[in-house]
Image (spheres, rainbow, N blue to C red):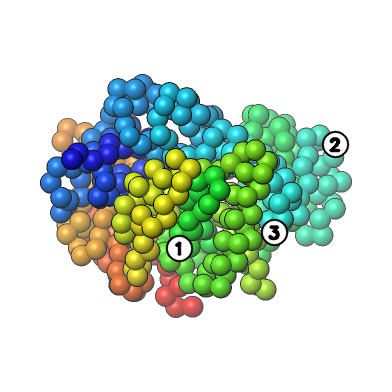
Amino acid sequence: MTGRKVLVLGSGGREHALADALLASPSVSRVVVSPGNAGTLTPPAGLPSGKALLNKPGAPLEVARDERPDLVVVGPEAPLTEGLIDQLSAEGFLAFGPSRRAAALEGSKAFMKEVAARHGLRTARFERVTDVAEVERVVGSFEHPPVVKADGLCAGKGVVVAVSHDEAVAAARDMLAGRFGAAGATVVIEEQLVGQEASVHAICDGERAFVLPAAQDHKRIFDDDRGPNTGGMGTYAPAPLITPMLAERVRREIIDRAVAGMAADGNPFRGTLFAGLMITPEGEPCLLEFNVRFGDPETQVLMNVLDGDVAELLASAARGALSADAVTVAPRHAVCVVLAAPGYPGTPEVGSPISGLERAAQIDGVRVYHAGTRIEAGATVTSGGRVLGVTARGSTLAEAHERAYRAADAIEFPGKQLRRDIARRALSP
Ligand code: AMP
Ligand code: GLY
């Protein structure tokens, strides 16, 4: 019997990690990544025979019509908020991800805050502002400098964690004046929370949720959380900050309430619900944001702590009949160290040859996920800000960490940037 054909839409490290996990799923024989990158051309070593991996460029709907996949998995948020799942479903495809209306949990921060308030999810106190004349009064109503967020998608650039009330006022005015176009026509001003951040992903079928182990990302470009924000410079999972007791509270008080609330509101959530959490010094889990897709580079570690049939998990969720026992959480740890191009998170310098990929891949437990790479005259060269997600699994966090850095050091390209402190917090608390 031939297995499922899965189409993965996207081109980053997240999509490479998903393609790998889907290809390794017993129910799958073929994975097509569109558009993919230089990494999604090569299946991982040691795969059973009869499995194929390929890249295909083109508009998502056209690629789906050509390939007739049994399952479509959409990586990034923009097409989800624009309704790609609705379009795919209307054409009869089984597509994993939220509808346009459910994707507003990420696409509109005001919508997310309103859902949280309506259904009792703990989150920072907020006010929604659309009139520049209101900014000063609203900012002044917060005792400490608040956080200012553009309502819509801004590729991670629409959040200002202000250090003074004046900075918050200026940021809100800037957004309302059109700095982010329509995405900033509404601004959310909210209380600044302190604590430690973690993210929890849940695979949802509209009614039920399967919660994955917690992960921690490292958002700033430099060690010790210094310098500008990035898309994420490295992750590890499971994150010991989320104790079993805390994980149970996050499931009950945040994930389950969101899933039940969205269903009650007539917008059932199917897909990956990714909760960005702040664990307060009192140990309370507070919701910072929802994303409606897998995190990047969270996926790179999460896919390394799951065993079983990820394709069946996602397909069952997309069908509305979650089969959580399709996978098991393995007693493993994973660490992902991102290698970034010089200039990132500003304009990256691209087109440099990358060496050492094979040497890195030979290290036990290591898988190098590609993000900003392309093939040029037969060689792999850099083509984006985040270039590679060097990921290792291990039976302990220390083992995964040692392998990931050994592999990261084996890979070279001019001006390579990486953080040296990924997972350090969990290794030496
Ligand atoms: P977001 O783009 O919504 O993920 O926010 C980016 C980052 O801003 C988060 O990862 C937090 O570090 C920070 N942040 C967002 N909201 C708050 C808040 N209410 N208090 C403190 N930090 C926040
Ligand atoms: N790594 C954070 C994100 O995917 O939003």
Q: Which mark is residue 133?
A: 2
What residue type is disc 2 on?
A: Ala
42 or 167, which is in the foreground?
A: 42
127 or 248, which is in the foreground?
A: 248
Q: Alpha-carbon neighbours of circle 1 within 10 Å: few (<14), some, or many (≥20)?
A: many
Q: Check contact, mark 3 vs mark 1: CB within 8 A.
A: no
User: What residue appears at the point 36 percent right and 57 percent down from the top-left corner?
Assistant: 327
Residue beneath disc 3 = 122
User: What residue appears at the point 31 percent right and 27 percent down from the top-left corner?
Assistant: 68
Q: For the residue with label 1, is its CB less than 8 Å from the closest atom of ligand 2?
A: no
Residue beneath disc 1 = 213
User: What residue appears at the point 54 percent right and 29 percent down from the top-left corner?
Assistant: 82
Report how far apart the C-alphas of labels 1 and 2 lie in the structure.
44 Å
Mark positioned earlier in the residue sequence (3 or 1): 3
Q: Secondary structure at mark 1?
A: loop
279 or 19, which is in the foreground?
A: 19
Q: Residue furthest left?
A: 49
Quadrant in the picture for residue 192: bottom right
Counting from the top left corner in percent of width and height, residue 178 is at 68, 30
User: What residue appears at the point 77 percent right and 42 percent down from the top-left corner?
Assistant: 128
Counting from the top left corner in percent of width and height, residue 387 is at 34, 46
Q: Secondary structure at mark 2?
A: helix
Q: Left of 190 or right of it: where is 338?
A: left
What residue type is disc 1 on?
A: Pro
Residue 154 in view in this figure: no
Mark positioned earlier in the residue sequence (2 or 3): 3
Q: For the residue with label 2, is its CB less than 8 Å from the closest atom of ligand 1?
A: no
**Quadrant location of the N terminus?**
top left
Report how far apart the C-alphas of labels 3 and 1 lie in the structure.
20 Å
Report how far apart the C-alphas of labels 2 and 3 lie in the structure.
29 Å
